[in-house]
Amino acid sequence: MLADRESQLLENLGAALEDPLAAARSFEGEMGEARRLRLERRRLALLVALGDLSGRFDLTRVTRLLSDFADDALDRAIRAAIRERTPDAAPLGFAAIALGKLGSRELNYSSDIDPILIFDPETLPCKPREAPEDAAVRIGRRVIELLQSRDADGYVMRVDLRLRPSPEATPIALPVEAAISYYESQALPWERAAFIRARACAGDIALGEAFLAAIRPFVWRRAVDYGTIREIRDISRRIRDHYAQAQAFGPGYDLKRGRGGIREVEFFAQIHQLIHGGRDSALRVPATRDALAALAADGRIDADDAAALSAAYTELRTVEHRLQMIDDLQTHTLPAGQGALDNVAALHGLPNGAALIERLRPHVERVGGVYDALAGEEEPRLPADPETLEASLKEAGFDHPAGALRIVEGWRGGGYPALRSPQAREALEALLPGLIAAFAQAPDSTHAITRFDAMLSRLPSAINFFRLLEAQPGLRQLLSTILCHAPTLAEQLGRRAELLDGLIDASALDPVADIPTLIGEMAARERGADYQWQLEHVRRLVGEKRFALGAQIVAGASDPLEVSYGYARIAEAAIEVLARATVDEFERAHGRVPDSELVILALGRMGGQALTHASDLDLIYLFTGDYAAESHGAKPLGAVVYYNRLAQRVTAALSVATAAGPLYEVDTRLRPSGAQGPLSVSLDGFARYQREDAWTWEHMALTRARPVFGSTAARGAVQAIVDDVLNGARPERDILADAIRMRAEMATHKPPAGPLDAKLLSGGLVDLEFAVHVLQLRHKTAFTPRLREAIRLLAAKGLMPDTMVEAHALLSRLLVTLRLVAPDAQPPAETTQALIARAVGLESWDAVVASLEATRQEVAACWAAIRAGG
């Protein structure tokens, strides 16, 4: 019938199929926009159907053509509605945000479109004395009328505005600021999830894109909202229940809503996008098959599952289109009658309905199986009766089930702030079976549940935390291990439960990225973000990455030495980003000092690129150029005052705790003249001090100095001074006598914390460091900030025993590990002893104790030989 009405299109069908959109528009005659759009839509539907049935157009081309036409039609309808009311006004201030299949450019032949209409009261064209709110509603109504009113030529498309906020109470077009406020503060989980496939598609595109940018942080959350994911799963279950009669596969099966159907493919992709997309923007692709491909390429889902779901989606959507070609019906259900089903099969190139059913069967079964595994069944709840619960805890493996019972009963009583709402207690009940199973498998189940209880007592809110643990069984087990063995990490979790989010991906247990990559991640800013946002952003990332590094040791995934280097890379990237942001912020008020810049010199463990979880940052602030110069800005300052204030700001950026938590303790006491000297000194002043006045301990510190901030030229100038001083441009001192005296004073004022203090015990790391630095300064050789490399160089020259290389490795591994699991340097519980042995590469705790003792004796002998002048 449609082919008869548009027979002229068929006269040169090959050319028309080259560009169906252009061909659909190419007809003569004066007419209004509404009729022109109806005719174009009718002509395009014919061309697309012919291209589809002939095999010339694949599913992507079909859905893209239909979506592109819908974009154009909606845009033209908006322009026409504005032009009819205010002929001379620019079509600004009114935009359509596409959601659903239009948002992902995956429209069906008979799809509704689901836009949200927004307007800007400041720029929307209005009639004289007309309120923008009234004008926007009238424009919106006219747009709908132009698109969905029917006449002899049909209609353009159906418009469904029910995805807007509170559709029963709100106008059809929303002020943009009110819409932003709603999605920031009131949106339901499913409403945020709908914006996975959102885009500005018509009208004032700049307005639409600004709106989407403003709400992006509330859609793509770094801290995963498992409430949203649970709701999507619940929607899927409700759909299955509601359409139960169409769940059985065969004639009458619902291709869209049935088990193993189109919607389950879409939900599968969207759930994984919600889990991972807040941290990885590459996964925020709207089209379903593109999303599956991106998730598989990034290792988030199984590649075979992704391929199978994509193939199923293609087949199911194509057959869905066959259904909708018949009388332009908005249907997704296979015909129940044999004749009608045979007709659909014929359109699909198959001999009969039975062949169509068998063609679809493996796709439906595979999708249903994959989605069932994701959605899962509800876990059984723990018994409510205390006596039965205690028996269950005992059966699970708790060594003290009565104590565990009291803790669980306390949670159920809502005694903590995080458990006072019914929603929180319900989320806890859903989690409890899996949580109890994880704690029961821990080396010390009582310790694990007690630590979790202490952590829970400090949390102001825990719903999302519970849902995260419910959705990620592997995290429950890792959490149990952390609570059993790592008080340092457990204490951090008590302050920031969201740190556990960073362990969702297996990549969290991979080595830390290189410094340029980390800098790029930390320096990224959202549109309109200010300096304070940057500080929070860096703090959040650093906290997550340091926590993940600690978890690597606890999980036995990484060598503590590699973790130590990772801590240092994170700190160096944070210094670069925060110092640069602080400099930029400072310059806005005070300008720049001509031919001058800030340089930061790291010493100690930071200089040596090997931090522990608890390390301070030993920094010296320097500046290049003329100390007598003055900045050029609205509030000029002399160079000395300028750089001292700037250094204070940088220190604050690195150390002052904010809502995202603390970052680093910064120690600047190694600067020239120590705590009595200025915070920042000129390069000339630094060189003069080091060459004329510095003491032996300051030159020992300089052996591990490394510039970590400043231009390449400025860093080179600082390094040249350091090299010059270390190689002899310094006062003559009795290095050995000074070092012996300093080590004795340190032993008096800073004794070992406990019998496992690998740093301060006699024969520990401090003794080894003193030995290395004395040899470096006395022999003017082996200068490298990395202590391990310096030891190798000294050993190669015969100045130090080869055994000191492995001594350093054992002591460093032990120090890095103990900072997490036994920060008091006391022998830990027996279960944690095995973890320490594994971390340092030994077979047992006895071997750890014996190796520590033997290593200390070797280091003590080495240091004694040097003290004796050997």
Image (cartoon, grey):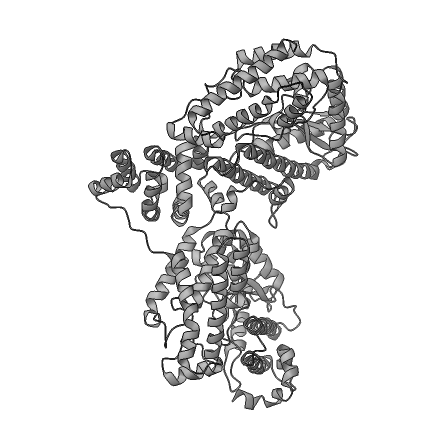
Which is more toward the observer, 774 or 671? 774
Question: 337 above or below 723?
Answer: below
Question: 6 above or below 781?
Answer: below
* Residue 50 appears in the rendering: yes
User: Residue at 61% of width from left, 81% of height from top?
Assistant: 24
Q: Where is residue 672 in the image (x, y as percent from the top left)?
A: 69, 20
Which is more toward the observer, 467 or 682? 467
Q: Position of residue 846 (x, y in %)?
A: 42, 24
User: Residue at 45% of width from left, 18% of height from top?
Assistant: 755
Q: Where is residue 634 in the image (x, y as percent from the top left)?
A: 73, 37
Which is more toward the observer, 539 or 719? 719
Which is more toward the observer, 584 or 537? 537
Question: 763 above or below 341?
Answer: above
Number of dots carrying numbers:
0
* Residue 685 appears in the rendering: no
Give the quadrant of residue 620.
top right
Give the quadrant of residue 15.
bottom right
Quadrant (top left/top right/bottom left/bottom right) for the C terminus: top right
Task: Using residue 421 as the reference point, say whether residue 508 is left or right of it.
Answer: right
Q: Position of residue 407 (x, y in %)?
A: 29, 36
Task: Using residue 243 as the reference point, say whether residue 676 is left or right of it.
Answer: right
